Image (tube, rainbow, N blue to C red):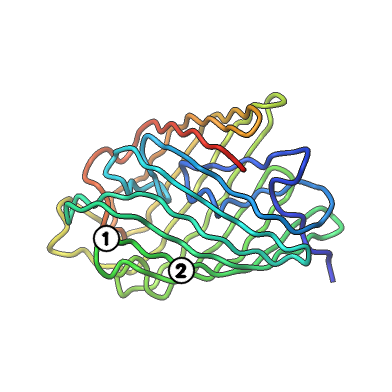
Amino acid sequence: MPAPAARRDTPGCRAGKFGVAGVLGLALFWCAGTVFAQLSGTLSVLSDYRYRGISLSDNEPAFQLGLTYDDALGWYAGAFVSTVESALYETHGVQAIAFAGYAWRMTSGLTVEAGADYSVVTAAPRFDYTEIYAGFAFQNITGRVYYSPRYFGSDSPAVYGELNLAQPLQDNIQLLAHIGILGSSAKPSYYMPYPASSGAVIDGAVGIGMTWQSFNLQLSWVGVNHASSAYGVTGTGNRNGVVASLSYAF
């Protein structure tokens, strides 16, 4: 059996997180090092909260907190909270995600993992959902596949896959890239305030990340190919645009 993975943010190195492309606390980046238990966290402010390319803050700024506990045996668990805004219901609230899983590190340097998460969106009714996922990390590339039997309260199953790249350019500067695809059988609803499609949603992001001590600054372009019925709480503004974020890791 492969040894459990040393999780992110081990002393001597910082793992990159593509915060604008997804959930900060769920990004898959590991650093090589001694396996030991640790509790870590991230505080962030973003110009726009893009969840899988879709704005959950109605293209407005958002604040986030993520906490993760990594066990020496390979188990991990954590929680993530972000402010959100629903243009559909004209309400403010939070998205809260709890997650747990297990990671293994192969002798080749490949890391694999499996886990589950549960998400609640308080700005709108019935938008809670559960996912299971499997993922990998190798050098600067990571990926995950998620399955939800009832995605974002749509009463329809969905599968989401993603690939992420964090390529060092200098000691404290990284090139960041992300691509994801969502397949959902959700049907357009009469209450959607904008044209939507039930086809696959492709999201992408590319940007630069700069780390200084415990701070990380990112500037990225993020976008999706079209609006989707799978996201009933999204804003009605720009689908594509530049997103800036500042995070503090502790």
Residue 212, x across and y down, in percent:
63, 27
Tell me the quadrant of the picture where the C terminus can be found. top right
Q: Residue at x 35, y 68 (%)?
A: 128
In the picture, measured across the screen, residue 89 lies left or right of residue 234, that is left
Disc 1 marks a residue whose amino acid type is Ser
| Helix, strand or loop under label 2 | strand
Residue 89: percent from the left, percent from the top? Answer: 17, 56
Q: Is residue 226 above or below residue 36?
A: above
Residue at image x 62%, y 52%? Answer: 28
User: Residue 190 versus residue 17: which sits nearer the camera?
Assistant: 17
Element type at marker 1?
loop
Q: Does residue 57 appear left or right of residue 103 in this picture?
A: left
Q: Which residue is mark 2?
A: 118
Q: Report crowding for label 2: few under 14, some 14 to 19, many 20 or more residues within 10 A (C-alpha).
A: some
In the rendered image, the quadrant that contains the N terminus is bottom right
Depth check, front residue: 55 or 136: 55
Place residue 183 in its image quadrant.
Answer: bottom left
Q: Nearer the viewer, residue 50 or 98?
A: 98
Mark number, residue 172: none
Pointer 1 or 2: first along the chain = 2
Q: How many marks?
A: 2
* Residue for point 41% across, 37% down: 46
Work out whether residue 162 or residue 214 is closer to the camera in this orientation and state it: 214
Q: Quadrant of residue 143?
A: bottom right
**On screen, residue 244 above or below 106:** above
Place of residue 29 in the rendered image (x, y in percent of width and height, measured from the top left): 66, 48
**Circle 1 sits on which residue?**
229
Question: Against 139, is 129 above or below?
Answer: below
Badge 1 crowding class, 10 Å Cα cut-off, few under 14, some 14 to 19, many 20 or more, is many
Instruction: Residue 126 in the image: state x and y as whole percent.
Output: 28, 70
